[in-house]
Amino acid sequence: MNHPGGHLAVALLLLVLVSMSTENNIIRWCTVSDVEEQKCLDLAGNATARNIRGQLLCNGTADAATMYADEIYTAGFCYGLDVSVGESYNGVDGNNYYVVALARTSSSDLSLLEMHERSSCHPGMRTTVGWTVPIGFLVNTSQISVDEQCNFPHAVGDFFGYSCVPGVKDPEHDPKGNNPRNLCEACIGDENDRHICANNPRERHFGEAGALRCVAENLGDVAFVKHTTVFENMQGKNQESWALDLELEDLKLLCPDGTEADLFQYERCHLAVVPTNAVVVRLEDKCRVYKYLERVQNAFGNATEGFSLFSSMNYGQPDVLFNDSTKKLLRVMGTYTSWLGSTYTTILKAFECEGGCHWVQLTVDLKEACYELERRTHIIVLLGPPMALIPLTQSNSVQSRYGKEAQRLAVVLP
């Protein structure tokens, strides 16, 4: 759930998307980096050369935006936006990855329905895999109860015996320094016992490989990771000693119904399926955006020569405009919740008390903000009037960037 700059990017997008409309034959993109602008211009030029109906402009009013799954939920739930197309990495569906619960095979008395006072290993604070999905699951199964202050870290700390949640004590996530210490007790830091619980690789239990290591070293009962994590770190693919000593038969999956399964049964034994990125639009633009993207996809989606819609090879960085793993764009006939899936949507609802729809309104130079965003996020930012919506939790950092004028203009929206 924690994407660098993601909330700020979404904030910049949402007001524009809900308030603007444009000509039926024009799709407007405002790129946030030179490489995005170049690929957008290349797409527009090649589309014109092929006489593809519709006009793509690489700046201007927002018509569409690519967003992560949790941002799609905010866009739909809070602002009434919808999804036009989604990326497919297998050419069949919009599944990105499965979030699974890993445990040692030797742990015979473990159940996902009885995790109280157990130890847990998480890739990082506020990540989809390591926080949103597992904590949402525990809330929805009534194992964790959040107080009126909506203090998830305290609820999680009271629930687990001890854990490693890298970043949980960072000022970004713990500005008052009150988050429970036991959420760092399964962390080990670096080789010199420094940087314990750091939200970076200096903490050796950071990330999905780190969470797997945490379980492998018997410092945690369960690790919350992607279904691919084990296969990416075993059978010689990870040369660290802890991974070389680990065999596939040493691990198992814990299922949401309290049963268990082997590592290859993740399609039936998982906490959630996280969908791929999708293109968010106003409801009235859903069809026309799909039709334009379908036309350019038919022309350039599988191109092996010349311009390729899903390749960033010529642009010096990955995932320009679309994820490079995309095989095709799928039309979304239902609502945004149909793309997210019922299980993932229910998990996200567990966090509604955090007030995801409450924002700080702030007038700033959006072009400048766009280029600041480019440094931190791959999200396509499309601009309209000089108005941005900044998440309340980020208002201080934004004010420090834009000065007293920004501070004067900031107001809380209901």
Image: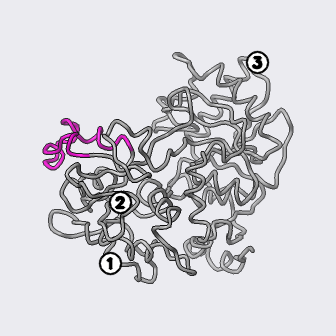
Neighbour class for label 1 at 10 Å: few (<14), some, many (≥20)? some
Identity of the residue drawn at 65% across and 19% down? 299
What x and y, as percent, mark residue 307? 58, 22
Disc 3 residue type (three-letter) = Asn
- 352 relative to 367, above or below: below
Query: Label 2: which residue?
Result: 122
Query: Which mark is first along the chain, 1 or 3?
Result: 3
Q: Nearer the viewer, mark 3 or mark 2?
A: 2
Q: From which residue to which does the magenta span run?
A: 227-251
Q: Is residue 165 visible?
A: yes
Secondary element under disc 3, as helix, strand or loop, is loop
Q: Quadrant of residue 290?
A: top right
- 159 relative to 68, above or below: below
Residue 181: give its label: 1
> In 3D space, how far apart are the residues under numbered discs 2 and 1 (Cα atoms)?
15 Å
Disc 2 residue type (three-letter) = His
Identity of the residue drawn at 57% across and 48% down? 68
Q: Nearer the viewer, residue 320 or 225?
A: 225
User: In the rendered view of the protein, which quadrant contains the C terminus?
Assistant: bottom right
Residue 51: give its label: 3
Q: Quadrant of residue 48?
A: top right
Query: Which mark is first along the chain, 2 or 3?
Result: 3
Disc 1 residue type (three-letter) = Arg
Q: Are marks 2 and 1 in contact (CB under 8 Å)?
A: no
Q: Quadrant of residue 238?
A: top left
Identity of the residue drawn at 75% across and 44% down? 63
Report the coloring of the rendering: one colour
> In 3D space, how far apart are the residues under numbered discs 3 and 1 (Cα atoms)?
62 Å
